[in-house]
Image (cartoon, grey):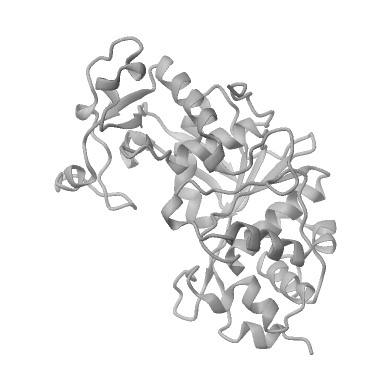
Amino acid sequence: MPAPLPPAPAPALGEPTSHPPVGRFAPSPTGDLHVGSALAALAAWASARRQGGRFVWRVEDLDGPRAVPGSAERQIADARWLGLDWDEGPDVGGPDGPYRQSERSAIYEAALRRLADGGHLFPCRVSRADLRALASAPHGSDGLPPYPVSLRPDALPAAWLDDPAAVADAALRFRVEAGTVAFTDRVVGEVSEDVSTSVGDFVLKRRDGVYAYQLAVVVDDLAMGVTEVVRGMDLLDSTARQIRLIEALGGTPPTYAHLPLLVGADGEKLSKRDEGLTVRSLREAGVAPEALVGWLAAALGQGDARPRTPAAVAATFEIGRVRPAPVPVPADLAHRLHTP
């Protein structure tokens, strides 16, 4: 069985590391690399490289039915076309592999056992429909009210995780203690949340046996020594939950930087289903990689949109110049970036 999750050597929340950082990019293989994902990949890569750090590429493919065959390979090819590289990943290997979540079940099971032994985990047979029926409770961003403390089991026998009757047809939930989680996001600023009132006890393994995103991302970041997380603003509301989970596993949270979302003319977040705004589609339309990288760098507040390589972006990259406001994407982006 893989070695249990060493604490990541990260500094206090929100403070830059004094050691070379470890950054990562972890796309889901549900289609070609979207420009919004390319924005996150460039920022995470440039931040790590600017500080002389390592960079990890990881494939978040736990949701098997949504995975598109060949998507992971196409995303890697398009990222390399942009000029990005990485020190560890599914195509180059590394000491902390495997780098596909679908191949890391034993590592997630070890983490669940550690949480159960620490009293942080319990089986739950309450369905989403049951929770929605709690109409009097305020609902969160996922449309569900916070999981009520009253639904927790009063006590669990020792070694309950090994009892087939205890876990049959049950999800596994993380027991959230009351109290505020506060951290400094390197883009957004000061953030605080009491997960016990905003979300409540949350699922780490679904009733169908699929590991939840919150568990997998935390376990992988700890196991791979990730010290800074640079990702999209749509994941900001997951951060307090992940900090609680990291602490329960005995790790140190990384620093966080949540990037602006790319939006269309209507102000709505661009959909990954918009095939006209994938790196592959822009590439096939004749856009040069340096042109797209330059536009992404400008969207990240790193100067104008002149064509640049990722290395040129990294040479002067400052996360403090990134602004949290959504970035509009022109409908004719390919035309604007096209260089004959």
Residue furthest to the top: 158
Q: Where is residue 339 in the image (x, y as percent from the top left)?
A: 78, 86
Residue for point 44% across, 79% down: 266
- The x and y percentages for residue 275 are 53, 76
Q: Which residue is nearer to you in this view: 162 or 19?
A: 162
Which corner quadrant holds the C terminus? bottom right
Residue 320 found in image quarter: bottom right
Residue 137 falls left or right of residue 206: left
Vertical side of 323 occupied by 44: above or below: above
- The total of numbered circles placed on residues is 0
Q: In this view, does 315 lie to the left or right of 178?
A: right
- Looking at the image, residue 297 sits to the left or right of residue 110; the answer is right
- Compared with residue 4, is residue 15 higher up or lower down, i.e. above or below? below
Question: Residue at position x 59%, y 33% from top?
Answer: 253
Q: Residue 61 in the image: x percent, y percent?
A: 52, 49
The N terminus - image quarter? top right
* Left or right: 224 as drawn, with respect to 144: right
Q: In this view, does 254 lie above or below 316?
A: above
- Figure quadrant of residue 5: top right
Q: Quick one: 329 or 54, which is closer to the camera?
A: 54
